Image (cartoon, rainbow, N blue to C red):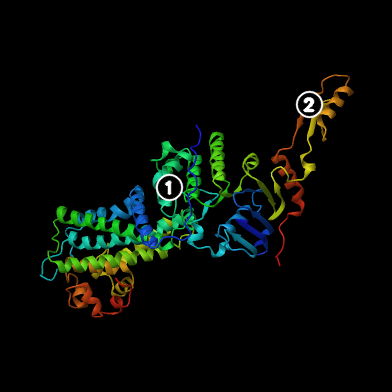
């Protein structure tokens, strides 16, 4: 077998075309999504994990007390954990996934190879962000479907709540992804990436009320947690699906939307933190 | 014509350790230059400075008319880089990965044509992580030339290749040479350098100890043929420019009897190289801080 000869060189353009940063960003996002779903461990720990936990918690704590919503009806475990797991999903898809993957790409030479190519660094990050957006969206949709059809959670019927959910989700994913990019600098090698990143994300989830009922945490811990996007996402997701359902959010303001709560400046923990 | 690569008095030191000390060389358009040297000699450090990955301590470096420390994306689009170690991003197929990289460049090669050129037609749809080491290395090479570069850096490209794959790689490189591509190659296979390079430079201890045409380095003395034979059970050797005459004299001296194990060897590039590196060893110890 012999090598096929290569075609002769074409004339070489000197300048790179305009708009390639965005175009390559979109191409990278498609590539990232495709390769993401080919890694079973990543898919399990960052994509399916929240669905698994929604199922476990909704069944295990079905007798638990999660307070009452604005209409005075009892909040079910599935209802509480739906918002919690949507927020956890945003955190896992954005922060955990990116922090681990970028740390691994740094140590296995992928980043070095890309750095030697004419791929703009902005396109690389756009690709990562696009991947996180797509997978987090699919994940949330999956969670909503499971919650609605398996556990009978009533989803909001008006556009207002969905609009709130949409922009909070978008901001949550973006800030979580940005934090993930920052946190990827922490692990010294790709091998230790999961060991370094997962505990951080787990602690954030615990103090943010993803696994424990947030209103039952001491107030100082709630304030600490509010610095991080996980807590904001969880509360905001909760707000959009069942307004004023915790004593804290009732106290926090009008209780109708996350936006009004933040704009009314309901305390440093909500107003002075990252935009979620 | 202006050289594609121009390196003058390049120095790179890490603290008190000097990795590269006063290296100078040029690579002309369309030329293949092989940088040879033992492990840790400073080859990869020098190459990574040219590729723009590392800063230099001092010296003047031009690659395609640019200072690599300030090379932008348009400059990178004219280069092809095959790093010493493969990246492990294995969740894409060979074709997907090549198509992805092809999109980075303004006038890339045809991906399927390139897959055929590196002999991976049957693996085009296979995930890279499922390939063997040598096959992955071929993907690395393909990724390095997918952008139709004017200058290719190949840092030990054939590590892990089986002999057939190496031959095929040589053909691929000759086809790049025929297109006018300039190539900077490092390799531990001296026959590879002899086959492909127009000129070679030998680096040891961070210094360029010799540089010249493949058939010139080491000087004429290092290429004098060697006659070896066995006499009274002892292996003897003699360097002579007239080996046939010498052997004839040996035969005559033993009254027409055939000498044992007689052979005439013309030193290969490898012999010359080993001689050069051995003679450089005493002076190539790490030095102090550079001026």
Q: Are marks 2 and 1 on the same chain?
A: yes
Q: Quadrant of the C terminus of chain B?
A: bottom right
* Label 1: which secondary element: helix
Pointer 2 with pointer 1, Cβ within 8 A: no
Picture residue at 18% right of the left edge, 59% below the top: A78
Q: Which quarter of the picture shows residue A213? A: bottom left
Nearer to me, A165 or B160: B160
Nearer to me, A234 or B47: B47
Nearer to me, B272 or A256: B272
Picture residue at 43% right of the left edge, 61% below the top: A120
Relative image position of residue B153 (x, y in whole percent) = 56, 51
Picture residue at 73% right of the left edge, 54% below the top: B284
Relative image position of residue B242 (x, y in whole percent) = 83, 32
First of labels 2, 1 by sequence position? 1
Relative image position of residue A133 (x, y in whole percent) = 30, 60
Cα–Cα span, label 2 and label 1: 53 Å
Relative image position of residue B254 (x, y in whole percent) = 88, 22
Point out the residue furthest to the top here.
Answer: B256
Is residue B206 found left or right of B263 in the rendered image?
left
**Chain at numbered mark 1:** B
Q: Quadrant of the N terminus of chain B?
A: bottom right
Q: Residues within 10 Å of mark 2 (few under 14, many from 20)?
A: some
Label for residue B98? 1
Residue A127 seen in the current view: no
* Label 2: which secondary element: strand
| Camera-side mark, 2 or 1 | 1
Label for residue B262? 2
């Amino acid at each position: 077998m012999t090598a096929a000869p290569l075609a002769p060189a074409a004339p070489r353009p000197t300048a790179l075309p305009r708009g390639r940063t965005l175009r390559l960003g979109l191409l990278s996002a498609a590539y990232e999504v495709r390769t993401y779903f080919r890694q079973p461990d990543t898919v399990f720990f960052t994509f399916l994990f929240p669905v698994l936990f929604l199922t476990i918690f909704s069944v295990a704590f079905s007798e638990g007390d999660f307070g009452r919503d604005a209409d005075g009806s009892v909040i079910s475990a599935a209802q509480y954990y739906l918002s919690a797991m949507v927020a956890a999903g945003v955190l896992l898809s954005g922060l955990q996934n990116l922090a681990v993957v970028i740390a691994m790409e740094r140590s296995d030479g992928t980043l070095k190879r890309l750095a030697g190519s004419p791929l703009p660094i902005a396109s690389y990050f756009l690709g990562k962000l696009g991947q996180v957006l797509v997978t987090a969206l699919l994940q949330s949709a999956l969670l909503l479907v499971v919650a609605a059809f398996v556990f009978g959670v009533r989803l909001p019927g008006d556009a207002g709540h969905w609009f709130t959910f949409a922009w909070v989700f978008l901001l949550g994913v973006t800030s979580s992804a940005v934090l993930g990019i920052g946190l990827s600098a922490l692990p010294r090698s790709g091998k230790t990436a999961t060991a370094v990143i997962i505990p951080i994300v787990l602690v954030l989830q615990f103090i943010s009320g993803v696994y424990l009922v947030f209103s039952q945490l001491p107030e100082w811990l709630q304030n600490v947690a509010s610095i991080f996007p996980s807590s904001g996402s969880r509360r905001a997701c909760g707000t959009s699906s069942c307004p004023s359902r915790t004593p804290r959010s009732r106290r926090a303001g009008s209780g109708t939307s996350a936006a009004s709560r933040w704009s009314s400046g309901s305390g440093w923990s909500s107003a002075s933190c990252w935009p979620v | 014509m202006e050289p594609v690569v121009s390196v003058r008095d390049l120095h790179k030191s890490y603290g008190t350790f000097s990795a590269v000390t006063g290296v100078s060389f040029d690579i002309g358009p369309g030329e293949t230059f092989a940088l040879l040297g033992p492990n840790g000699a400073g080859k990869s450090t020098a190459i990574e400075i040219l590729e723009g990955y590392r800063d230099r301590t001092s010296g003047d470096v031009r690659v395609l008319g640019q200072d690599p420390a300030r090379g932008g994306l348009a400059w990178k689009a004219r280069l092809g880089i095959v790093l010493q170690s493969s990246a492990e991003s294995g969740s894409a197929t060979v074709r997907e990965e090549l198509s992805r990289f092809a999109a980075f460049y303004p006038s890339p090669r045809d991906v399927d044509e390139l897959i055929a050129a590196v002999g991976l037609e049957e693996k085009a749809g296979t995930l890279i992580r499922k390939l063997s080491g040598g096959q992955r290395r071929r993907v690395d090479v393909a990724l390095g030339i997918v952008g139709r570069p004017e200058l290719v850096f190949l840092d030990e490209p054939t590590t892990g290749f089986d002999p057939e794959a190496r031959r095929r790689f040589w053909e691929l490189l000759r086809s790049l040479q025929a297109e006018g591509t300039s190539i900077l190659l490092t390799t531990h296979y001296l026959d590879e350098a002899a086959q492909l390079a127009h000129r070679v430079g030998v680096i040891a201890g961070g210094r360029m100890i010799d540089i010249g045409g493949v058939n010139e380095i080491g000087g004429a003395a290092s290429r004098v043929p060697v006659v070896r034979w066995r006499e009274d059970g002892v292996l003897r050797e003699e360097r002579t420019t007239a080996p046939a005459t010498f052997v004839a004299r040996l035969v005559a001296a033993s009254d027409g009897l055939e000498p044992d194990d007689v052979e005439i060897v013309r030193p290969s590039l490898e012999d010359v190289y080993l001689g050069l590196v051995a003679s450089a060893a005493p002076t190539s110890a790490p030095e102090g801080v550079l001026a």
